[in-house]
Image (spheres, rainbow, N blue to C red):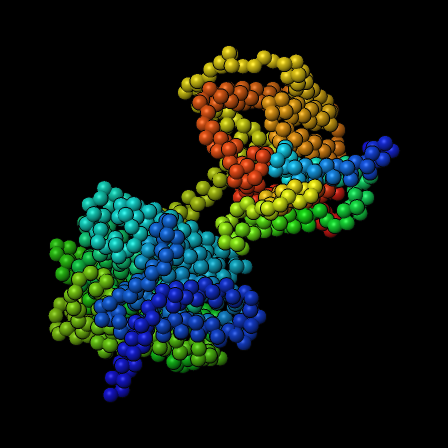
Amino acid sequence: MKGKNTFTFFRNLGFLTLKKKSPISMILAILSGFIVASMIPLMSKFIKGKGSILIPFLPLALFIYFLTFLPQVSQGNPIDFFYSWVPSFGVDLSFRLDGLSLLFTLLITGIGTLVFFYTYSYLKGHVYLDRFYGYLSMFMASMLGLVLSDNIMTLFIFWELTSISSFFLIGFNNEDPKSRKSAMLALSITGLGGLFLLAAVILLGYVGGTYSIQELLSQSELLKASANYNWIIFLLFIAAFTKSAQFPFHFWLPGAMKAPTPVSTYLHSATMVKAGIYLLARFTPVLGGTAEWNTTLIIVGAITMVYAAIHSLFRLDMKGILAYSTISALGILVFLIGLGTEEALLAAGVFILVHALYKATLFLITGIVDHETGSRDVTVLSGLRKVMMPVAVAAFLAALSNAGAPPFFGFVGKDLIYEATLHFGDWAYVLTGAAIVTNICLLFAGLLAGYKPFAGPLPKQFEKVHLPHPTMWVPPLILAGLGLVFGIFPSLIEKSLIQPVFTSLVNNDTIIHLKLWHGFNLVLGLSALTLATGVLLYWKLKPSNNLLRKTFKFEILSPKTLTEQFGNLFSNFAKLWTGFFQNGYLRNYVITILGFLTLLLAFRLYQGVNIYIDTATLTDVTIYEAIVVIIMAASIIFTVFSKSRLVAVASLGVIGYAICLIFLFYSAPDLAMTQFSIDTLTVILFVLVIYNLPKYKSFSKKRVRIRDGILSIFFGTLIALLTLEVLSEPLNRETSKYYAENAYILAKGKNVVNVILVDFRGFDTIVEITVLVIAAIGVFSLLKLRLKSIEKE
Amino acid sequence: MKTIIFKTASTYLLPLLILFSVFILLRGHYLPGGGFVGGLIASIAFIIHSFANGLEKTKTIIKFHPGFLMPIGLAIALLSGAAPLLIGQSLMTGLWFDEPIAVIGMVGSALFFDTGVYLVVIGVTLTIIFTITETI
């Protein structure tokens, strides 16, 4: 009876949301994280004090909001929200809530809620608690946007935002250089992937003619047949592999564990690292099913899952163990998507949830252990069940679900994986073998992190350890409990959650059945074998420092070392390059610019010039013009050979005035006036600066002067040639004619130059005067601020 | 440079040049001139004065920091551009009074815009030159 009531309750809620399906509520829900994040700095004192308990209610509210869509989505009706954002680029804020998106939104907001509450105690009283909540909210919003976007351009933007918020969170302990380095490494790798994603998005849009995933779905055949298909999947794969830490890009994830534990839980195991998986899953119906797609994913996924699983055997730090087992789990997901059969995709959908539940629990527990005992070393920790029973229960439940022991949800997940690999044609035995090896190692890792710290005798140093605040130990208990409940009653989520996920992955109407018990068959046998071997391995292999040190020998060949070496090489090269071109000497910049321009112009002229001077149309040289030219030539000689700076500057001024006269002769009085004032001011400025400089005997060496002279002569000659060439081109006077004819009619002015400035091109003028103001402020602050610092000394 | 002739001349030149700059500004729409040149001429007037009498004297004449002219000028230019929006026309449409005003002549939004430019140019030039003079 009660169950029925809840059902009607949800259906009513669903009905409510059906009625007001406006995009505003969805956009607001997605952006709420950004809004809160931007408001937090304004109330930082309040957030750090009494207000800190309020923030976790944001993800909670969002969780409930998304839960209301469950009834409608589980009936197989995805919900679309559309809002045109930048129509000229085809970038829309269009969101689509289908099974896959819903699973992710519920994970993001659900685990988000628990992590936010957990943070409340974990970082209580931390100086930067407000910032932390801000980054976390920003991340949550970006991640929601990522999984809900139907437009791949907005998907890309949110993708980048998750990388950026992850950077802030990994580097949260910003006083620690290791933390900063890890953050940089993670940003470089995921940022690199972001660039590849952008290229993939543009190529997809170019080939498919749309940025909407829904519309691309109908273009699937066209995309697969396109010559760019291999490029698209290559770019997409790099993006997904960097984000989801696949070999050989996996190494940023263990480094990312420098972040506080809530971050590791939330970003680096449950949600963000699954963004790559999401991307692959989302594009499976669009691009999947080809040999290139499947083979690449199977190979990369298999290598990653086995490599990382074996790596996790040797770790001693609980976080390190979990990091490598997370990489391995992500490998399994890529592997399953690569298999691409319906069974495999179902297994992937289930495993996303299974993994999120147990891995988040284990991370939260690691955080508690670290917080209370100050250590994460599995060789030191033991017997903690005696002082923190609820934590031990949660850890043990999670370890069992991870191990795939019945009746846990992990058992359901692992069965599906084995079924998928066993039914995969010729390679079935190899693939199943790889899956078994991975699962054995993962089981070992799970026991190491979830069982070992709590088993055995309690050492003296931990006797005073006590249970933390409930907001810390309740979240892992809830997650671990769900792993058990979903395992015993898979029907709870079979129709409502997993079926829609499956439908959006395979894009047809097959009905699925989740079962805990399949009867005695090969799959059960394999499960039993995995369990037995894993437990045996746990009793036999004791992790120790010696064992860990043995793996160091291989470090030199690891992708991490190679990448770091490449990074150092690149940064050294950049230093040399920048040091050469940007050395701070004004004369070098001028030489570089002029030299480059000269080369460019010379190349252009080399290709052929068309200079033609029609002597018949030239007017006679008047005496005034001749005098002005003589004055100019004389001033140039004065400027170049003068021994005094002031004389040189004054001569330059004379050249400027001579140019004014030429403007005047050729009827451009406006230009002449402006040039005249500007020249005056320039000379004044020069004098002001130069007046106080010490007097040199000679300005520069002869060699330098000859070099500068040659460059100047070349540059001047080329410019002169260019001007002549421009003159020989037929002039297009349409624009100037329009201005001249309409200056009075449209703008009531007779001075065309001025009308252009204040009316026709008034917008340009506004921008120009703004630039002038910025320059003035720049000069002012540069000089005045420097003055102040000198005064201090 | 503080010779008596220069000093005496500068005291007379200052008002004359400023008057001239306003004249240049106002005639700009019909004859050579405009806000930009006008602003430069006005700045030169103040700079000549400061050369002859010292920066401190010039500052006491201006009374406030010339930098304040920059936001004022920008605001005038922007507002005159945005004014047509109020009567439902598009941005930067030229608006004109029907009858000419004595001495100034036809007055329209373009004149206000040019006045904005004029003030910005004075503000920018004087700020840069005064700052450099003070610092070096």
A632 over A456 or under it: above or below: above
Q: For the point 19% across and 68% down, which residue is it?
A: A415
Q: Can residue A337 be seen in this view?
A: yes
Q: Is residue A321 visible?
A: no
**Residue reaching furthest to the right:** B4
Which sits in the foreground, A678 or A378? Answer: A678
**Residue reaching furthest to the front:** B99
- Residue A650, position as x, y percentages in the image: 71, 26
- Residue A459, position as x, y percentages in the image: 44, 76
Which sits in the foreground, A556 or A353? Answer: A353
Q: For the point 29% across and 78% down, which residue is it?
A: A12
Q: In this view, does A185 lie to the left or right of A512?
A: right
The quadrant in which residue B129 appears is: top right
- Residue A176, position as x, y percentages in the image: 52, 59
Q: For the point 82% across and 37% down, which residue is it?
A: B12
Q: Is residue A518 left or right of residue A450?
A: left
How many badges with numbers are in the image?
0
A790 over A310 or under it: above or below: above
The quadrant in which residue A652 appears is: top right
Q: For the point 48% across and 70% down, which residue is it?
A: A374
Which sits in the foreground, A533 or A35? Answer: A35
Q: Is residue A382 left or right of residue A46?
A: left
Q: From the image, which quarter does the N terminus of chain A lie in?
A: bottom left
Which sits in the foreground, A617 or A597? Answer: A617
The quadrant in which residue A706 appears is: top right
- Residue B118, position as x, y percentages in the image: 65, 42
